[in-house]
Amino acid sequence: MASDEALYAAWAGGDRRAGGRLIDRHLPSLARFFGAKLSDPSAADDLVAKTFEVCAAKLGSFRGDGTFRAYMFAIAHNHLRNHLRGLQRAGERFEALEISVADLDPTASRLLVRDEQRRLLLLALRSIPIDMQVAIELSYFEEMSRAEIAEVLGIPPGTVAGRLRRGRELLERKIEQLANQPQLRRTTIDSISAWAARLELDRRG
C-alpha cells in the first residue's frame, strides 16, 4: 500500500486520483477529530471539508519533514481553534489550555451515543482544556507519536509527555465526577490506564 507521503507527492504532481485516495484514507480520522468536540454535525463536516481544502490549495507545502497526518491534523487543529474562538464572547481571550469545549458550547453534553462507557469518556474529554483534549485524543484514538502531537499543537516535543500526563489526571477526575455508576467509572478509568500502559510498552519496544 502506498504511503501517505507517496500519495501526497503524486497528488502534488498532478495525480488527482492519488489525492482522492489520500482524502478517503484520512476522512474517518478527521470526522472523529471534529465530531468528538463539536455538538453540531454540520459544523464538524464543514471543518473536515475546510481542512482538505487547505491541503489541496497548498499542494507542495508539505515537505516531508514529518508525517502527512501530523501536517493535516495541524491544519485541522487551527480550524478547530478558530471555530471555538468564534463561540466566545467578544473581547474574551482564547486560552486553549484553560478553556474546555463544555465551557464554550452549552450543548456539548448532548451526546447521542448508546455505549455508556464511550459516552462518559467523550463527556469527560469535552470537559478538560481543549489542547489537553486534543493531545489525549491524538494519542488515544490516532496513536500518534509525541513528535507528531508536538507538530500538531505547535509545541516543543519535550512538553508533550507532561501535557498528556496532566490531561489524563484531569480526565480521570472528570470521569469520577460525571459517572453515575461505580462500575462504569472503574471500567472507563481502567480502559485509560490500559491504553497508557500499552503506549509506554510500545515506546520501550
Image: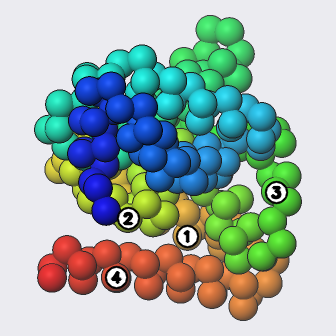
Residue type at tag 2: Glu
According to the image, label 4 marks what residue?
198
- Give the Cα distance between marks 1 and 3: 19 Å
- Give the Cα distance between marks 2 and 1: 19 Å
- Label 2 packing within 10 angstroms: few (<14), some (14-19), many (20+): some
* Residue for point 61% across, 47% down: 31
Identify the secondary structure beneath mark 3: loop
Q: Is label 3 or label 2 in front?
A: 2
Q: Earlier in the sequence, mark 1 or mark 3?
A: 3
- Label 4 packing within 10 angstroms: few (<14), some (14-19), many (20+): few
Q: Is label 2 or label 4 in front?
A: 2
For the residues bearing labels 4 and 1, Cβ distance under 8 angstroms:
no
Residue type at tag 1: Glu
Left or right placement of residue 20 versus residue 12 in this view: right
Residue 30: x percent and y percent? 54, 46
* Residue for point 81% across, 65% down: 113
- Give the Cα distance between marks 3 and 4: 28 Å
According to the image, label 3 marks what residue?
111
According to the image, label 2 marks what residue?
143
Whether residue 84 is visible, yes or no, is: no
Identify which residue, 179 or 191, lies in the foreground: 191
According to the image, label 1 marks what residue?
172
* Residue for point 33% across, 25% down: 14
Q: Earlier in the sequence, mark 2 or mark 1?
A: 2
- Give the Cα distance between marks 3 and 2: 24 Å
Residue type at tag 3: Leu
- Give the Cα distance between marks 4 and 1: 17 Å
Left or right placement of residue 196 versus residue 2 in this view: right
Left or right placement of residue 140 versus residue 117 in this view: left
Residue type at tag 4: Arg
